[in-house]
Image (cartoon, coloured by chain):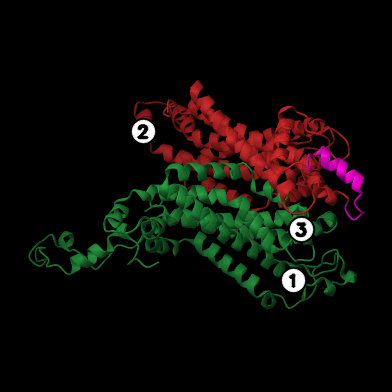
Amino acid sequence: MATYILKRFLQLIPVFLGATLLVYFLVFSLPGDPIAALFGDKPVNEAVAAKLRVQYHLDQPFFMQYLLYLKSIFTFDLGQDFSGRPIAAVLAEVFPVTARLAVMALIFEAVFGIVFGLIAGLRKGRFFDATVLVASLVVISIPIFVLGFLLQFTIGVQLGWAKPTVSSAATVQDLILPAIVLGLASFAYVLRLTRTSVLENMNADYVRTASAKGLSRFRVVRVHILRNSLIPVITFLGADLGTLMGGAIVTEGIFNVPGVGNRLYRAVLTGEGPTVVSIVTVLVLIYCLSNLLVDLLYAWLDPRIRYDA
Amino acid sequence: MTPENNTPRHGAPAVRARRQMEHFVADVAETPLQATDKVREDNAPLSLWGEAWRNLRRQPLFLIAAFLILVVMAVSLFPGLFSPVDPSSEACQLANSDGGPAAGHPLGYTQQGCDVYARVIFGTRSSVTVGLFTTLAVLLVGGIIGALAGYYGGWVDAILARINDIFFALPLILGAIVVMQLPMFRANRTAWTLVVILATFGWPQLARITRGAVLEVRNADFVMAARSLGVSRVGALLRHVLPNALAPIVVVATISLGTFIVAESTLSFLGIGLPPSVMSWGNDIQAAQSSLRSNPMPLLYPAIALSITVLSFIMLGDALRDALDPKARKR
């Protein structure tokens, strides 16, 4: 098992390096001067531009730049954003907010997705199943920014059940509505995945055996059907954590959540290359680690998977 | 695709050969077991696609989706047929700002006084263009990479899988946002730029699906048969492996067409997709956002159009999946 963890961990390294190299290349090496873009319509101040180029190592050859950038990541010395704040401090401020939002969204989609999916699967072809299936398709097809506006307008403004925008503290209470919006599309996927998985397992031999030896319906469903059905669902949820954090840009914009997505979007609009690269790097890292977590969860959930290979 | 070619697994040539043979079935008139002995050899089995088509024709979900997609395609090709009003910005009258429905303008006006209905109709084209061409590009890139990885295996697979992992670590919207802000792309924001960028970050999923599908068929008996009859490796891949691995690829491509349409409108909505001068649903939703509380309709109608288009592609994909997967098919 330990060797397996180590091996999976080592496999992450090329992915991480490759993804950061790709982003770094895109931001700093494609035609167009990122420093000149900073000045907008104003004339470029050569002295300031030269100083900035040195600060971001843009005077070095590309590969050297990237190596220096990697070094700065591992020493947590990410430089400063264009308003002069250390990027590391900015990250420390915005990441906890988005992490809270993503985890709340994950809990929402997991609890409701699995419960609804299980009920739909057990009652295949009935009214509840049909309704839930169609509803999930509709939810998947409505883009998140439309959903966000609709829920903000109806629940937040007209009904007043939840706050339509988030305070700068971004408490758990503030984040309920944004978390639901963020998790809604994945909720539909979790639901459909659970349903399919339950349907497959219901006809399995071990479920028939369990029923035949007289176990209660509840125990068969809970231990034999549900636990086996959750294996693909857990995989999806684990990988989704990284996607949710990276995909929160739109949701955070609509509800004015002071998180990663908002900061990233601002950095993108003002052309702050270094901040963009830093944020994306951390997001890639989170994605890689959550995938590793999924692999390890597999071992715990499915003893059939062996790790000596 | 006709049932006659490319379908070794369904044995159409074998049936044809048997039809010419002499029959040694007992004379049906003499035996009481008429029903069982009656061999209907002319009833050749349908191909996977033929059978899928027979199933699909009876599915209301498929029929609705196909109808909606045909309508959307027609609207994007000939918007003038569906809206007599010229929706270009010059035609907007500020006097009509936020106006309700009027004769000839069934959905009311935007804050700028533009006809909402006409803008929804004329905005269809950019969404459909980006969605369709991104899907084609992704099919090409992801399909080739996935097919090579699955078919050749070994070090080819290892290298391509790593590249795939790297692109997979960057979510579609995140990657597109990072790239769209670059001076080079910001300067020419057209539908084709979006196609290139979305395809750059969108191909890994299709490559994975293709790789899996090719891997499943690669060692099938009919591929072996073709190879031993002297078909080259590439020839076997193109003529025997790919046609039989097509089903899951088509399903995923159909569904991702919807995803790309959403991605285009999301980027336009964020202000880094198509420029505001281009009519698109994302831009219209973005423009209507500021007057949401006083006049929500200009936001609602393009949003509905967008959702229905995406929904019909997802429904089509879902119906195709059910029809093409013999395991999931209910008899």
Residue designated by label 1 = B118
Query: What's the mark number on residue B285?
Result: 3
Residue B80 vs B191, above or below: the answer is below
Report the residue at 76% width, 60% height from top: B283
What is the count of numbered marks? 3
Colour green, chain: B
SS category of the residue bearing label 2: helix
Could you tell me which chain the residue with mark 2 belongs to? A
Find residue B6 and report its image quarter.
bottom left
Q: Is label 2 or label 3 in front?
A: 3
Q: Would residue A28 appear left or right of B68 to someone viewing this image?
A: right
Report the residue at 74% width, 61% height from top: B189
- Figure colour of chain A: red
Find residue B315 and report its image quarter.
bottom right
Instruction: Kindly tell me whether residue A158 is visible in this rendering.
Output: yes
Q: Which residues are magenta?
A: A40-59
Q: Residues within 10 Å of mark 2 (few under 14, many from 20)?
A: some
- Callout 3 and callout 1 share a chain: yes
